[in-house]
Image (cartoon, rainbow, N blue to C red):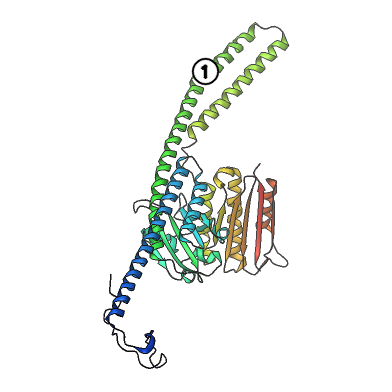
Amino acid sequence: MTDPWRGCAVGRATGTAADAPGRTAEKRGGADFDEDDEAVLRTLAAAAGVAIDNARLYDDVRHRERRLGASSELTRSLLSGDTPTDVLRTFTTTIRDMADADLVTLAVPVHGTDDLVVEAASGPLANRVRGLVLSGESTLMGKVFSSGETIVSTDIGHDPGAVVATAAGSDLGSAFLLPLGTRERIRGVLQVANRLERPQLSDAVVRMVTGFADHAALALEIAERRRDAELLTVLQDRDRIARDLHGLTIQRLFATGMTLQSATRFIDHPEALERVESAVDALDDTIKVIRSTVFSLKARGRDTGVGLRSRCPREVDAVTEMLGFAPTLRVDGLLDTHVPEPIAAEVIAVLREALANAARHAHASRVEVHIETDGDHVRLRVRDDGVGPPASPTRDSGLGNMRARAESLGGACSFGPAPDGGALLAWRVPLG
């Protein structure tokens, strides 16, 4: 331990504290400090240094225990069959508790695109950023995802690439972003941030969260392998069922139909003949349904198409050049699971029309898109800060098409002024 008293002069203190601001202590009675006093102070300084070191070691042990406990809980959740969404939410909440941070977000890649989406967030501002889509490498999260390097910032709220901080709408200060996974395969980007008035996130916190994130990435890898194995089992069962339906059921139904059809020439009663012919037609329809089912079983799980969640960012990116800036996109809910393809196609068509109208007529500097589903409805909201709806529209073809699409599905579409200026399109249809 470094001697804190090395180089310090010990002698008689003279004058007052005001005369010598650098002096901090005087001996009672005005006597000189002697060697015994110096030895006592050296002993106290050594004891204080030991106490500080012990406190740091104790704090490190506590952090290590919390990290190990959180890692064990995360692994248990992943391997017990909890949904990935619930696991990621628990993960961000745990990180926030460990780091004592104001906002923790986890962005994961969108399949089939170069974009990231904030899949999970924890903190008072979480609802503002959850579902936010981040396009390209121009954002800080995009840079971390492409490079695999950790970024530390002391004032992230004023960084032009901090899209999450801007969307949060709060003055964020100290923050760090780190990749989740290995350099060969990065699974997402984790961002931990504090408000400006909060303390700076220390290097010890960065190391602690990095260690936990590495363990979490390994646990996610194991869980994904397990889900792949389960999916393979399901696909193999589907193939077996399809073979059985095609090789046994269809053949037996076809043979039964042929037998009944050949027996019609021996039936003289008109009503009985009509019933047998009706049964033959029903068997023929049943064979068609089973063949369609067989095709569906073989095709399901091998579809290489992109779902609604992945198509939305592409539509937003396509209009960026026309607008002169990138719109903000949020997606919430299980769009690919709950929204059937016919309705998803309508959503994309309405989104494309709404963005094109905003680019041509709004003269806006900001466009926000929000698409969500709760399992019963799918909702699309497109909001801009432009000139607002015209007082007397001269043509209504685009808006009329969007309304017609909604009404044909039993939904509704509205277009009018936004609460804070600009225009707001709200489109909503049921999924039933």
Percent position of residue 17, x then y: 41, 90
Percent position of residue 399, x then y: 67, 57
- In the image, 99 versus 147, the foreground residue is 99
Residue at 46% across, 47% down: 73
For the C terminus, the quadrant is top right
For the N terminus, the quadrant is bottom left
144 sits left or right of 402 in the view: left
Circle 1 is placed at which residue position? Answer: 251
Residue 359 sits above or below residue 40 on the image: above
Count of residue discs: 1
Element on which disc 1 rests: helix
Label 1, residues with CA under 10 Å away: few <14, some 14-19, many ≥20: few
87 sits left or right of 356 in the view: left
Percent position of residue 300, x then y: 50, 35
Residue 293 sits above or below residue 130 on the image: above
Would residue 137 be seen by someone viewing this image from the given angle? no
Residue 229 sits above or below residue 152 on the image: above
Residue at 69% across, 46% down: 408
74 sits left or right of 364 in the view: left
Residue at 53% across, 50% down: 309
Residue at 36% across, 66% down: 51
Q: Amino acid at mark 1?
A: Gln
- In the image, 187 versus 13, the foreground residue is 13
Percent position of residue 410, x then y: 70, 46
Would residue 78 be seen by someone viewing this image from the given angle? yes
- The single residue placed furthest to the front in the displayed view is 29
